[in-house]
Image (cartoon, rainbow, N blue to C red):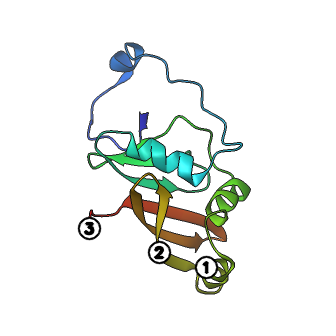
Amino acid sequence: MAEVESDHDGDVGDQAKDLPPEPKPQPLVGCTVDHLLRLLASTPGASDLHLSVDLPPVIRINGKLFQAPHEVFTPTVVQGIVYDILTDEQIETLESTHELDFSYSPGDGLNFDVNVFIYKSTVAAAFMKAAAA
């Protein structure tokens, strides 16, 4: 996964040539929130998943943000993926208030706190691993 933010201030040109090539981005066609949450759950140290337009899925690992090896989200794709897990009532609330907080479980004992919001007319979402009860 490519790191989104870096604490390194120096020239990375020499270091970058020694890194393995980034994998070809995986297409998002047919991708679901459940698939992405299972990716998050299977990644050691991962705590959050962020879905936003013009970026691939972003995962927080040990406090740092990394881009998953997927294509970037278009407005239609991110809205479709998020709306797939919402009820009609939740969609109404989101579209009228531009924000929605709820809990979600893809199964397998996984639980997430979710914040979905509309920013600049596009849907975005953050999924955070819920604390164990």
Mark in front: 2 vs 3: 3
Judge by depth and name the residue closer to the eye, 49 or 34: 34
The residue depicted at 69 percent of the width and 52 percent of the height is 74
Q: Is residue 52 above or below residue 117?
A: above
Q: Is residue 100 above or below residue 25?
A: below
The residue depicted at 66 percent of the width and 80 percent of the height is 95
- Which three-letter amino acid code belongs to the residue tagged 2? Phe
Q: Is residue 21 above or below residue 9?
A: above
Q: Is residue 89 above or below residue 3?
A: below
Query: Disc 2 vs disc 1: Cβ atoms closer than 8 Å?
Result: yes
Residue position marked by numbered label 3 in the rendering? 133
Check disc 3 and report its element: helix, strand or loop. Answer: loop
Spot occupied by residue 7 in the image (x, y as percentages of width and height): 26, 41
Circle 2 packing at 10 Å, graded few (<14), some (14-19), many (20+), is: few
- Which three-letter amino acid code belongs to the residue tagged 3? Ala
What is the CA distance from the residue labelled 2 to the residue labelled 1?
Answer: 9 Å
Residue position marked by numbered label 2 in the rendering? 102
